[in-house]
Amino acid sequence: MKKILKKFPDYYLTFCVYALIGWLYEVFWMWFVVPPFHFINRGVLFGPFLPIYGFGMLILLFMLDKFMNKKHKISNNLYLIISILTIITFIYITIIEYTTPKIFHISEFMSKYGIGLIIVNLVSLGLGFLILNKTKSKKIKNLDVTIILVFLLIWIITTVIEYASHFMTDKLFHTMLWDYSKDFLNINKRVNWDASRNFAIGGTLLLYLVQPQIDKFLKKLPSNRKIYITLIIGIPMLIDLIVNVISKYVVVL
C-alpha cells in the first residue's frame, strides 16, 4: 500500500498524459476522418481529457509490464500458434473490410466468412510448423514474438474495456457515448473492428515508444515537483468532474 501511495503521482501523471492523448485522438478522428468533420469536445469533461484512455493505459501497464520484459520465442508452440493466428486473422479481416461494402455484425461475419478464416489459419499453422521443424536456423527459432503477443493482448483488453464502458454508461446513465451499429464488424453497437484494431495498434506504439520516454521524464522529476504538478492538474480535473456530474445527472433528476 505504501508503495502505491508513493508512486501515486507517477501513476496520476501517466494517467493524465494518456487521457490527453486520447482526447486529441478522438477530436482529430471526428474532425478530419469521420463525420461531422468539425471540432467536437469528446468525452464527459469540459477539459481536454478522456479518462477512459488514461485508465485503459494504466490497466495495460499493470497487466503487461512483466510480460513485455520477458522474451517469448517462436520456438514455443503456443507462441507460434498465437502469433500466426493473430497475423493471419488481422490480414484476412482487413482484406474483407476493404473489399466488401457491407456492414457485418460479428455473428453475420462468422456465418459468411468464418469457414474461410478457419481454412487460411489452418493452412498457415501447418506451414508455420513445417518451416519451424525443417529449419536449422537459430535466428528463426529464437525469433522474439513478444510484440505480437502484446499486440493481441492489448486488442483483447481494450475491446473488453470499451464494451464494459459502453455497457455501464448505457445501463447506469442511459447515455450512448458512441454507436457502432453502422460500422463494419460490430458487437451490439458497443465495439467494432476499426476501433479495436486502432486501439491495439495505438496501444502497442504507446507502450513501446511513448511509455519509456514518460518513465525517463518522471525519474528525472523531483518528488516534490511531481506532487505540485499532480495537485495543479488534479484539483481542476476533480472540479470539472463534479460540475459535469451535477449538471448532467443531479440537476436532471
Image (cartoon, rainbow, N blue to C red):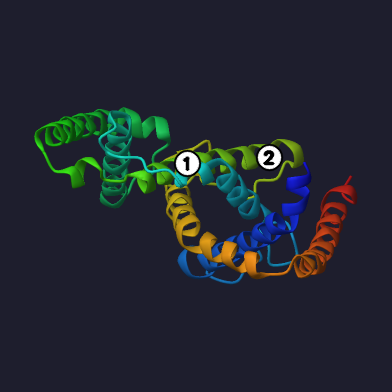
How packed mark 1 is, by other alpha carbons closer than 10 Å (few <14, some 14-19, many 20 or more), is some
Residue 161 percent coordinates (x, y): 58, 41
Quarter of image, res 163: top right
Of the two numbered discs 2 and 1 on the same chain, state the one appearing first in sequence: 1
Residue 141 percent coordinates (x, y): 21, 40
Q: Which mark is residue 67?
A: 1
Please state which of residues 102 and 25 is positioned toward the viewer in this rendering.
25
Horizontally, residue 98 falls left or right of residue 135, namely: right
Please state which of residues 120 and 100 is positioned toward the viewer in this rendering.
120
Please state which of residues 86 and 228 is positioned toward the viewer in this rendering.
228
* Residue appearing at x 74%, y 46% in the figure: 3
Q: Amino acid at mark 2?
A: Asp
Residue 242 percent coordinates (x, y): 86, 55
Secondary structure of the residue carrying numbered label 2: helix
Quarter of image, res 222: bottom right
Identify the image quadrant of the C terminus: top right
Q: Amino acid at mark 1?
A: Phe
Residue 3 versus residue 232 in the image, above or below: above
Decide if residue 83 is in sight here: yes
Quarter of image, res 121: top left
* Residue appearing at x 62%, y 49% in the figure: 58
Horizontally, residue 118 falls left or right of residue 191, namely: left
Q: Tell me the CA gap for discs 2 and 1.
A: 33 Å
* Residue appearing at x 74%, y 58% in the figure: 9
Identify the image quadrant of the N terminus: top right
Residue ID for mark 2: 170
Residue 214 versus residue 125 in the image, above or below: below
Horizontally, residue 84 falls left or right of residue 105, namely: left
